[in-house]
Amino acid sequence: MLRLSNLSKYFGGVRAVDALELNVKTGEIFGLIGPNGSGKSTTVNLVCGIFGPTSGSIELDGVDLKRQAPHQRIDAGVSRTFQNIRLFDDLTVWQNLWVAWRDAPGQEHSWFSNWFGRSLSRRHEIQKLLEFSGLGDKSNNLAGNLAFGEQRRLELARAMASKPKLILLDEPAAGMSSAEVTDLRQRILTMKEMGITVLLIEHVMELVMNVSDRIGVLNFGTLIAEGLPEEIQNNPLVQKAYFGSSENTSGGDTNAIDQ
Amino acid sequence: MNIDHIDVIQALIDGILYGSTYALLGLGFTLIFGAMHKLNIAYAASSIAGAYVGLASISVMAIPPILVFFIGPLSAGAIGLVIYFACFRYMPTGNQLAPLMASIGALFFVDEIIIHETSGSPLSFPALLPDSYFFLGQFGIRGDLVMVMFFSFVLMGIVMFLLYRTKLGLATRATSQQSVAALLCGIPTHRTNATTFVLAGILGGFAGCLIAAAVGVLSPLITLPLTIKGLIVTVIGGLGSIRGAIIAGFLIGSFENIFLLVRGVNERDIYVFLLLFVFLVFRPNGLFGTAIDRD
Amino acid sequence: MLYFLGIFQTIGVHTLLGLSAYVLLLTGQLSLGQVGFFAIGAYVSGILTVLFSWHIFAALAVGALVAGFFAFLIGFPALRVKGLMLVVATIAFSEIVRLFFFNLSWRVEVNGFDVGPDSTQGFREIRYFAANGWEQTHVVALIWSFVILVMFLLWWLDRVRAGAVLRAVGEDDLAAQSSGVNLTMVKVAAMTAGGVIAGIGGGLFAHSTTYVDHHTFTILLATFAVSYPILGGHKNVFGTLLAVIFIQGFVIEGLRFMGDYRNIVFGLLIILAMNLRPQGLVDGHFISDIKKKLGGKPKKDSADA
Amino acid sequence: MDYNLKSIATCVATVAIMAAGAASAESVINIAGWGAQSGPLRSFGVNSNAVIQAAVKRVNEEGGIRLADGTMATLAYEYHDSACNAEQAIAVARRVASSDVLVGIGPTCSGAAAAMFGVFQKQVDDASDTGLQLPILTDTAVRNGLAKISQWTFRNTPNEPAMYDNLWEWIATNQPDLKTIYGGTETDQGHSNGTYSKVIVQAAIRHGFTWAPGDLEGLTGDIASGFEAVLDSSANWLQADTNFAVQARAFRKSGADVLIVSSHPFTTCGMLKEMSRQRIEPGLIVGLTSSSSAEVMKGCPDEAEGMIIPTSFAPITDAAAEVAALANENGGDADLHSAAAWENVMIIKQVIEAVGITGDASMVAQERRAIRDGLEALTETEGLLGTITRNQAEGEALKPYVFVQAQAGGWVVVHDPR
């Protein structure tokens, strides 16, 4: 589904992502882990088009995304969440989804009613998505007034509103209680059942190891290991990257977009 | 009029020298913006107000005219503090628009007070170095503007020293980059910001006095044009960049003088604004600015 | 009465100016360039009625379209800058427009009189209304039908998806982009709409004051334009109207009894208002209070700012 | 507290009743003045107001205004702030027009006047024109040719073409060694620019002066001839400029005998200071009428030394000196602009007494019309410096004038052509 080849992104002299090769298969949950500053968020931003790559290619189902603007990549089927929640705080919960909404194929609204319709039929569908996200009774609340966990769920729902083929989750479990992580795990699995491919970037090992089909380990912008969760857990290279050389936190700038 | 290379060089010299007044103003704008990421539109007006207070005190009290350059900056610092409390201190942190709007109100207020007290009449301002015009070969040079230029470098040095070598500077920079984190680290952000405003105010008052001395006349007519000039200098120099503000001041001063010479006064400002526009589009971070889309 | 009709005209014209800045503010763009579009609308429609004896409606329409066209063009470079940079870029634009009209001299003889923009001397005698027998009530009706139309459209916009998209861009353009919003299209569209609204306002202004010159369209008026939606609050289109009534009706005309101190109070009131209501006069609480008073069910929690 | 408030209220009410009683015993003629009392041009409004206040007081001290039935009416006036802003000037005009004011004086700024005059009826008796119908006699707004915008608007402002024509003639006679001229103006100020490029330079050419950098195409002695070429060839600035180095250098380079600085006090002072820094010492400096005010003396008394300006006001007659003193008492200055306001009040009194007014509030429209016709019928009036003749096709005045020169921090009359 998603194929990154020889992908690089330099910030000045810092190689945030360096000749990265990554292949995410259709329908799988791919976990991407790595120490702070290893280039995980930059990778997400490259795939979403927030940054242009220094070199290399990004392909989705064989289509080159590199020349597409960020919003066109949504049309192509990629959507994302942010490491630090970025909701539209002064819009209501359901308006947050309305903004991101893409009609299912075959049920598209006309251009006019897409932009200027009040579209009650969509309201119904949006409500269904809200129910699924456990926000059914909050649809008229302002997003900014939700509790932390609810905001995380809303961001997830917003990412699903555009009917993506591939979702990039940027540390979705950050700051969650373990009960919430369990709930999140369930939701990610449900997404997979719905046929959505998931690229999960996460620090919370409990989640990554339990939910991922395959895991890649990023360090200094390159993939140092890739494999099944158990293989990764026992890989000495990974352990070294995580614990052995933690003083080497290169590229403070790479998370720029999420600071 | 025929223009030869001597005219051009002379216009460049005049422009760069006069540009040092813009540089001083830009320095204050950039200092406040660097510290708070907020725009104080009333800044140029309060700088000029400082010059007025200085002028008023030397004409009311029988004190030597040179004291205007001490009283002016101090009163502008005080005005800066008042503006900080009136327009910035109690505004919600995330709200950019409310303090901007309040500072627009402060601009009107300060301007109107000056106008009310002087009836808008131009007032003579003591020269910094009277009769200090000298010649360097064929070129005439204003001694007082050389002095202003010297001051702008000195002040740049002082500001850089304060920012990068003192505890106050550390606090300012920390507050500017992560105000919440700075607060958590025990840095009193409000007091830091207030100090920045007073510092910038003193700087502005000094700039206001130097500008008034350079023109020789003080009038409320100049506050808006100076506000715009200060903003242009800040932006071309790069937001928050101290040396950028200084260099941009010289750049704008010489640029406008060349176009005044070559294209006439009616078109002069069009070219200055076009330059600004080109800068914003092709180099949106200015000469020395860092990327601002971090947040 | 005549006096109040005149004030209504001023309030109407300034409301259009404020609404043009309001549209941009929805997308998070703080523009001091609206006065440039306002000037374009004023000069173009004035030239059409005075020099070419066009009907006022046609002249207003063309003025608005020309202003909108320039806004469209400006929209693209403006995309590259944000925040303070955008403020300064739009100042540059409106000053360039002003200086263009400062240099514009286009004198034509119509009915034995030399008319038209005369650079510094200004553009005199844009007397379409008086010369065609329009009563002040007619002028007020014309101006306010545009105000009501624009306000209605903007009010309606907040009820359709386009409005939510505009506000989403205003809140967080990166998140909006990552939710599939075409930023270029949305921002340029908002800029264009703002230009058209300012253009109509400018045309009405020129005809209601009969005279424009480059001093009319300075940074001061640009500041007023953004002041209205900021002071009024951009939660709601009525905030802008309320702010215009507050500034033009109350502070400028209503405080005339304060004589010399009127303009000093002006600045103080703005500072005071922003400290008391940093979200604007018509903020979330204000709206929910009104809704409660009207007996309607306020949407639960939604109006809490 | 309560008690105090009550007593104040009672007191106020009593005074009000007494005042109303006193007023009803005699009729009142209302006039209104307006101009900039806020903004950078505030001094215009302050001065104008001070002078009108003194003039109205004088009229009332002398018994008031004689009405048609022979009784005397008090003159009452109110001054409004129009802030040099078109919309505010129009708002005040409409406000005044909807009251029982019979005639207005103002506004002070030319831009505001150009806009305001436009909302007046262009031609009287044109029923299809819905413009305002209220006679206006303007004191300060001096930009060329404004009064002809409407037949309801008149001005009592100096006639610059006549003044400068005479000035150059006088210079040519008295200082025959001065041959060449050069100068500059603040181009963004309509009055400075128009007077410079269409009036002053042409008048000099008419009297044999030559343009220092060389002859200009189309520049003859006729008013406005070749004005674009004049502007192109001059060294100009803008009204809020602060740096005059390039312009002063062009002045020096021109080597002209007479330099013209056509601008308002602020930039006049800025320019003069730069000229003095660069040690430019021409044979003579000629200034703009508007700079013959006290403001230049506040801004640059030393540098202005020797500058000559024609002006329609100087305290050289008893009447003029008295007005100057009265204006000072009221916190303003009498200058060529504001002193006209005194004359305007006197002209209004003269016209009202000539046409016969009842002062009846129900007849405001007819009486305004009568006063307008009376103003139009005027061919001559007495001003502070002598007889003012009127060019009524344009609604303008031809005022007597003198030439003043800056000497030792004050304006001294150097020639009195009256």
Image (cartoon, rainbow, N blue to C red):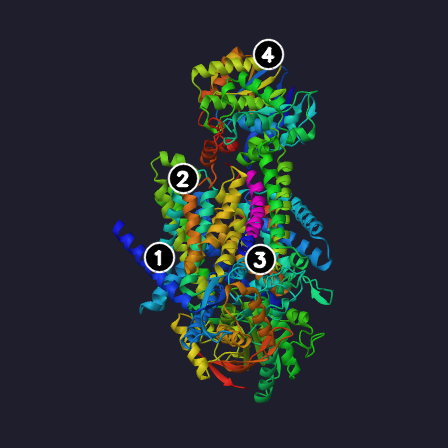
Asked if labels 1 and 3 touch by Cβ distance under 8 angstroms, the answer is no
Q: Which residue is mark 4?
A: A193
Query: Could you say where residue C72 lies in the image, as x and y percent from the top left?
Result: 66, 44
Residue, disc 2: B174
Q: Which residue is mark 3?
A: C216
User: In screen coordinates, is C267 left or right of D130?
Assistant: left
Q: Which element carries disc 1, helix, strand or loop?
A: helix
Q: Nearer the viewer, mark 1 or mark 2?
A: 1
Rendering coords of residue D397 (x, y %):
58, 76
In the picture of the structure, the residue carrying the numbered disc 1 is B74
Q: Secondary structure at mark 4?
A: helix
Q: Does the image show residue B4? A: no
Instruction: Indicate the secondary structure of the residue bearing disc 2.
Output: helix
| Tag 4 subunit | A
Circles 3 and 2: CB atoms closer than 8 Å: no
Q: Which residues are magenta?
A: C8-27
**Does residue A237 appear left or right of residue B194 in this picture?**
right
Instruction: Identify the element where label 3 is drawn.
Output: helix
